Amino acid sequence: MMTRKINWLMVLFSLIGGTVGYGIGEFVLAEYESSLPNVVLMAIYFGQLAFFVSLFCLLAEIISPALNGKGWRQRYASTSWKMLVPSSLVLLFAAGALFQFLYGLNVGSFKRPENIVMAIDVSGSMDGNDPNRQSFQAATDLIQKMKKSNQAAVIAFDDQATVIQPLMRLQSQAVKDEITQKLNEYKRTGGGTEISRALAEVRKEIEADSGKRRSLVILISDGYSSMDVPAVTEPFRQEQIPIHTIGVSADAGGEALLRDIAGQTGGSYHRVDESSELTFIFDRIYEENQVRHLVGERTGSSQDSMLSALLRVVLIMGIGILFGLALGFLFDNRFLARNFSIGGAVAGLLAGLALEWGISGWPENSEWWRLLAALLLALVVTLFSAVIPIKEGGDAPRTMRSYSPLRRADSGFGSDKRDQINKGF
C-alpha cells in the first residue's frame, strides 16, 4: 500500500536549521571571503548548511518519528547520529568544493586582475572636495588589503602626471609600508585636470610590466577634462583593461566624462558625494574583480553570460539533490532518499534561480537572496516526503543497505539480524 507521510515538526525544524546555517554562512563570507580560496569557502558554506539542516531534521524525527516510526527511534536513532557528519557535512563539503571548482572554470574564463593601477586627481579643486586626503587613504587601505601576488602603482595628476609609485609586486608587508609612506608624504600641487595625461602614464606603467599580467585601473577625479575619449581609451579597450572611474562631487560634465571612460573600457562608474566613502568604493571595485563564487555576484566579462547563469542554476540544483540524499542516508531509508532527492532537485532549481535572478538584479541585497535560497533548500526537501507516496508492506525493503528484509510494522525499514543489533550502514 502506498501512503503519503509528512513530519510537520521536521518542516519547521528544517527552516530553523536553514536559518542557523545561513547565519553561520554569512559570518564565514564576511570574515574569510577575501582570504580563503573560493573552493574552500563554498565547501565550508554548503557543508555546514547541510549539517545544520540535517541536524534539526534528525532532532525533529527523534522527537516525533512520523516518517520512520517509534521502532526506528528506539533501535536506529543511534546509527543516524553516527551518520550525521559523513552524510551531511562531509558529503556537501566535498560537493561544494567540486561544484565551485567547476563554476570557477567557467567564470574564471576571464583572468583575475593582478596589476592594480590607481590614478588620483590632485588638482586644485580636490582641495575642497577631498580636504582630508581620503583618496590617498583609500589607496593606502586598498594596498594593505591586496594579495602578495598583486602588483600596484599609484599616479597623481593635475595638468601633469606624476608616478608616485611605479608598478611593484606587493610581496611583503615591508613593500606595502614603503608605498604607504610615499603616499603619506606626497604633497598636492594644485594645477588643472588633464585625465588624458594620467591615462597615458597609466599605459606606460602597464606596458612596462614584463609579465603581461591582467590589469585594472581605478581613476578618481572631481572635474571635467577636455579629451578624445574613444582615442584615449582605445588601447585599454583592445587590451581588455577596464578603467573604473570615481567621481568625487563631480559636476554634470565631469560625471558624463567619467561615465564615458568607464563605459568605453568595460569598467564601472561610481559617484561619491562624500570623500569619506572612497575607501568603501575602492574596496568594492577590487572585490568585484576577483573570481566569484556560487552564492555571490558575478562580475567582469561573465557578468551577463547565459552559460555562467545556467551553470550556477544547474550546480545549485545538484546541491539540492545531495541535500535530499543526505537526509536519505541519515535515516537509512531508500524511499525517503528518493523523495527527498526529488524534492532537493526542485529546491535546488528554485534556490539557483533565486540566486541568479536576485543577485544579478539586486547585488546590494545579496544576503537576502542567500537567505531565501537557504530556506528553499531546507523547506522544499522536507515537504517532498508527502508529495510522492511511500510504500508500506510488500516485499521491497526500505533500507538503503542490501541486507535481507525482515520488515517492521511500525517503521517499514528492511531489517535482518544485523539490523536488529544496530550495526549501522
Image: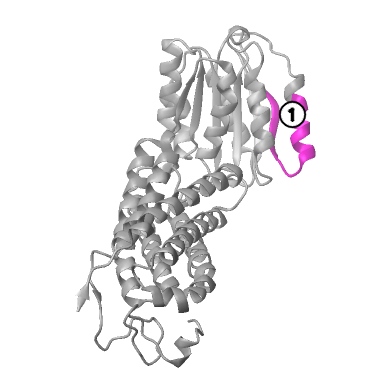
Dot 1 amino acid type: Thr
Image coordinates for residue 157, horizontal then vertical, percent: 62, 18
| Magenta extent | 163-182
175 part of magenta stretch: yes
- Which one is nearer the viewer's eye here, 424 or 258? 424
Tell me which residue sits at (68%, 28%) in the image.
Answer: 140
- Which one is nearer the viewer's eye here, 251 or 384? 384
Q: In this view, does 133 lie above or below 327?
A: above
Image coordinates for residue 376, horizontal then vertical, percent: 35, 52
329 part of magenta stretch: no
- Which one is nearer the viewer's eye here, 412 or 358? 412
Give the residue number, with chain letter if any, for mark 1: 180
Element assignment for label 1: helix
Tell me which residue sits at (34%, 77%) in the image.
Answer: 334
**Residue 332 seen in the current view:** no
Q: In this view, does 355 lie to the left or right of 394?
A: right
Q: In which quarter of the image is residue 220?
A: top right
Q: Is residue 357 left or right of residue 141?
A: left
Q: In which quarter of the image is residue 126?
A: top right
Tell me which residue sits at (30%, 69%) in the image.
Answer: 339
